[in-house]
Image (tube, rainbow, N blue to C red):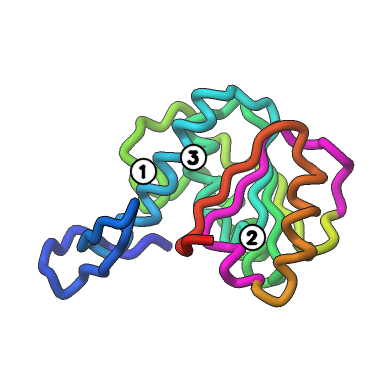
């Protein structure tokens, strides 16, 4: 789960660039910034349904669900290990502290993570209906799909009713 980022030493910093300006950030800060941007997006557009493509172990969705318990969250992940880890975490009595404290926003419902639907699937052939989700997003996932990006992006657009968000670490 989230790494301990309380160590403020520069040994744990990584170089980043945003709008052609360089920054040094503590490891974990980029993920937390992405979560904050996604949370602001959800506040702004007020989706009923949200899909994360490339959900990994479910961290992003679990954090977001605790802030927005009325939203129906779904995650699709290529690997069986990622889906298994997410589903095993859903068996916990409540959202583990390491996840609950990962984002600076208050947790509205620490049990909402149990309602997330996690499925194993391929981003180039999503098994969802056209326009099924109000918001579809990726967070450091497209960069790992270089060989199928030309197939995955149209699929992501297809299953979105209206909004897309990409938190990816490259300029294109």
Residue to which mark 2 is pinned: 54
Q: Which quadrant is the N terminus positioned in?
A: bottom left
Magenta range is 127-145
Residue drawn at point x = 51 percent, y = 32 percent: 41
Q: Separation of disc 1 and disc 3 at Cα? A: 11 Å
Q: CA distance from mark 3 to mark 2?
A: 15 Å
User: Percent position (x, y) of residue 54?
Assistant: 64, 60
Q: Quick one: 33 or 155, which is closer to the camera?
A: 155
- Up the image or down, 91 lies above or below 171; here it is above
The residue that mark 1 highlights is 103
> Along the polypeptide, which appears first: circle 2 or circle 1?
2
Answer few, some or many: residues within 10 Å of disc 3's Cα (few below 14, many 20 plus, some between 14 and 19): many
Which circle's residue, 1 or 3, is located before the other in the chain? 3
Closer to viewer: mark 1 or mark 3: 3
Q: Is residue 131 magenta?
A: yes
Which residue corresponds to the image point at 89% horizontal and 42% vertical from the top-left?
Answer: 129
The span from disc 2 to disc 1 (Cα, nearest Å) is 19 Å
Q: Earlier in the sequence, mark 3 or mark 2?
A: 3
């Amino acid at each position: 789960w989230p790494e301990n980022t309380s160590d403020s030493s520069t040994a744990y910093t990584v170089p980043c660039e945003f709008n052609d300006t360089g920054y040094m950030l503590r490891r974990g800060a980029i993920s937390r910034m992405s979560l904050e941007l996604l949370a602001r997006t959800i506040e702004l557009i007020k989706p009923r349904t949200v899909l994360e493509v490339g959900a990994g172990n479910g961290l992003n969705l679990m954090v977001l669900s605790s802030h927005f318990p009325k939203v129906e969250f779904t995650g699709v992940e290529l690997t069986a290990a990622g889906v298994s880890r997410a589903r095993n975490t859903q068996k916990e009595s409540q959202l583990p502290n390491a996840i609950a404290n990962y984002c600076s926003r208050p947790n509205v419902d620490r049990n909402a993570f149990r309602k997330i639907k996690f499925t194993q699937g391929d981003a180039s052939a999503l098994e969802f209906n056209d326009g099924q989700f109000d918001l579809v997003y990726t967070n450091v996932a497209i960069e790992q799909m270089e060989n199928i990006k030309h197939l995955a992006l149209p699929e992501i657009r297809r299953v979105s009713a209206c909004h897309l968000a990409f938190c990816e670490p490259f300029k294109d």
